[in-house]
Image (cartoon, helix red, strand yellow):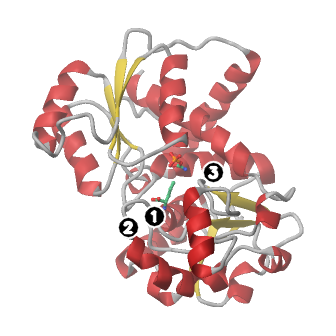
Amino acid sequence: MPVNIKGRSFLKLLDYTPAEIRYLLDLSKNFKDMKRAGVPHRYLEGKNIVLLFEKTSTRTRCSFEVAGRDLGCGVTYLDPGSSQMGKKESIADTARVLGRMYDGIEYRGFKQETVQALADFSGVPVWNGLTDQFHPTQMLADLLTIEEKLGRLKGVNFTYMGDARNNMGNSLMVACAKMGLNFTACAPKELFPADELVAECRKIAEENGCTVRLTEDVKEGTTDADVIYTDIWVSMGEPDSVWTERIRLLKPYQVNSAAMANAKDTAIFMHCLPSFHDTNTTIGAEIAEKFGINEMEVTDEVFESKRSVVFDEAENRMHTIKAVIYATLK
Ligand code: CP
Ligand code: NVA
């Protein structure tokens, strides 16, 4: 049966079948080819989309803006301080107003329930640009990048090192289970994903011929990996007070040359970005001064190495987000 997701929201990958994800990846490739070849694709001329950000962003915002404009849409950006949402107007009321004016709504913020409420009340497709729980548009970019670099998804050994119960850990576990990659969370047990989500992903993985493994052992977790992935140790919205504990827990799980050496010779390094791989950021410099560490979740050596595909991955955010906008609004 042909895949059709017109009118659907994109809130989390759990809501999508492997065939629907496959369709979005193929569509992304087409859009990437068109963009590279300079072929115009203003298929959504006359439509308007709004981008609601309650947290900061570089990649996600720019991807939605460029993708929306490439497709011919009008694009409105509302920053964390400049709408009434939440402060003077409920999510339900905001959704009903925006749904009268816009054809699609992107939301980045805190609770998954907020993006769900926008979808429930607006009557138009809503796209999750990151919540505390999930980051689904990032997943499409990551899957596309893996397929481009390794030539396949099924059977790929994927290792995520770091905070495995944050939005990235959760989302990558779901994405791997859906698309047939063997997922390993290599993390301290305090930061393992929630039991319920692990159980759900194991069931999905079984259907798709792959595995979900959790380990505290770095050697075991990285051996024979095709992909080593990490994310920042403290996510947006978390208080500064968690840094001390997080550094203590996650220092052994830093992606460094020893971890990469355990992986396959062909292994790639991935990161959703932004990354603390040096002290050239305000927070990076503050942490270096306070805790005496110049690199956090990944060493500068690995980040800058030939195995690192992080900027291809960042570019793919735009092509994949374009596919989501197009497929849900066309
Ligand atoms: N990876 C990602 O979502 O980046 P931004 O926070 O810059 O959007
Ligand atoms: N876990 C990170 C992901 C950023 C793209 C955060 O939520 O800040």
| Residue 143: mark in rendering | 3
Amino acid of disc 3: Leu
Label located before the other in sequence (3 or 1): 3
Measured in 3D between alpha carbons, the distance from the residue under mark 1 to the one under mark 2, in whole angstroms, is: 6 Å
Q: Is residue 171 left or right of residue 7?
A: right
* Residue with the mark numbered 1: 235
* Residue with the mark numbered 2: 238
Viewer-closest of 74 and 296:
296
Q: In which quarter of the image is residue 118?
A: top left
Amino acid of disc 2: Glu
Residue at the spot 64% in from the left edge and 64% down from the top edge: 181
Amino acid of disc 1: Ser
Tell me if the residue at label 1 has its CB under 8 Å from ligand 2: yes
Residue 147 rendering spot, x and y as whole percentages: 72, 49
Residue 281 rendering spot, x and y as whole percentages: 61, 56
Q: In this view, does 158 lie to the left or right of 262?
A: left
Measured in 3D between alpha carbons, the distance from the residue under mark 3 to the one under mark 1, in whole angstroms, is: 22 Å
- The residue sitting at the front extreme is 289
